[in-house]
Amino acid sequence: MRVALLDSGLPPDWPVAMRTAFALADGAVVEVPPHPDRVGHGSAVAAIVHALAPDAALLDAQIFADAPTCSAAVVAAGLRWAVGQGAGMAVMSFGLPADRAVLAAAVAEARDAGLLLLAARPARGGPVWPAAYPGVIAVTGDARCGVGELSRLPGAYGACPRPWGETADTPPRAGGASLAVGHLAGLLARGGALEPDGAAPDAVAARLAPLIRWHGPERRETAG
């Protein structure tokens, strides 16, 4: 499977099938030469995907430069590039605080092209995009989940929130929904290429069902 990572980039020596970068210049989105990951976020997500699905071909769509923020138009450009490169999955380990028409249109085009779309949704707070769009698989971090384990939450999947190689006993350097997206992407990609209609919600649910260990949010027991 060809997996497009829309993120802060990867190290220059990382094996990728294709790589590019997008940025805003004078109010317009332009394709620019990619640079080494300055944030570390994309590298962390890629490490998870590669560890779980070593045979997946990674496509590096660098949309962040010096911080994990960008415009909806830049994300849209990355999605359209992923479709053009024949990706089967787009991994978007972030959430934008507002709905934008340009992003909604690109998401709809990607879905129509059969692209499987994964995006981060924080465990708390209001909706974020693209996770809030119909047909996008929303993923959040669930501390109950280890590697290879999932939970089914209202409107989202929960997955391991830790960087690759860290355990529940290790204080996390980073984590949460963004790294959980990487874990879920790796679990889907390690199954190989999607069958026809494999990006349909029912097909994804069937593929992930054997990995679901918990249903519903974590509940804290109180003495009483």
Image: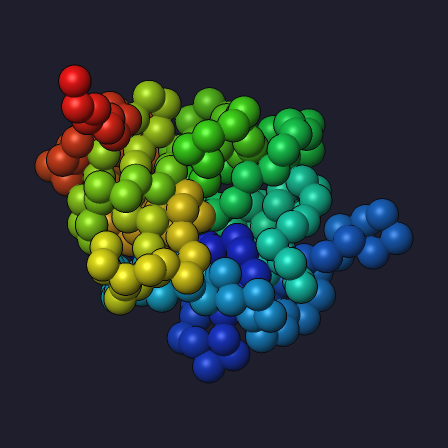
Q: How is this picture coloured? A: rainbow
Quarter that holds the N terminus:
bottom left
Residue 40 at x, y = what percent?
51, 66
Quadrant of the rendered image containing residue 39 = bottom right
Residue 33 in which image quadrant? bottom right
| Left or right of 108, for residue 206 | left
Nearest the eye: 16 or 37: 37
Q: Nearer the viewer, residue 73 or 222?
A: 222
Where residue 48 appears, as percent x and y from the top left, is 32, 60
Which image quadrant for residue 108? top right
Q: Is residue 194 left or right of residue 17?
A: left
Quadrant where the C terminus is found in the figure: top left
Residue 35 position within the rendered picture, expressed as x and y whole percent measured from the top left = 63, 73
Q: Is residue 120 above or below residue 58?
A: above
Q: Which residue lies at the image location 67% right of the left edge and 40% below the top edge? A: 72
Residue that sits furthest to the bottom in the current view:
13
Residue 83 seen: no
What residue lies at 62% left-to-right and 45% top-to-bottom? 75
Residue nearest the viewer, comparing 64 with 97? 97
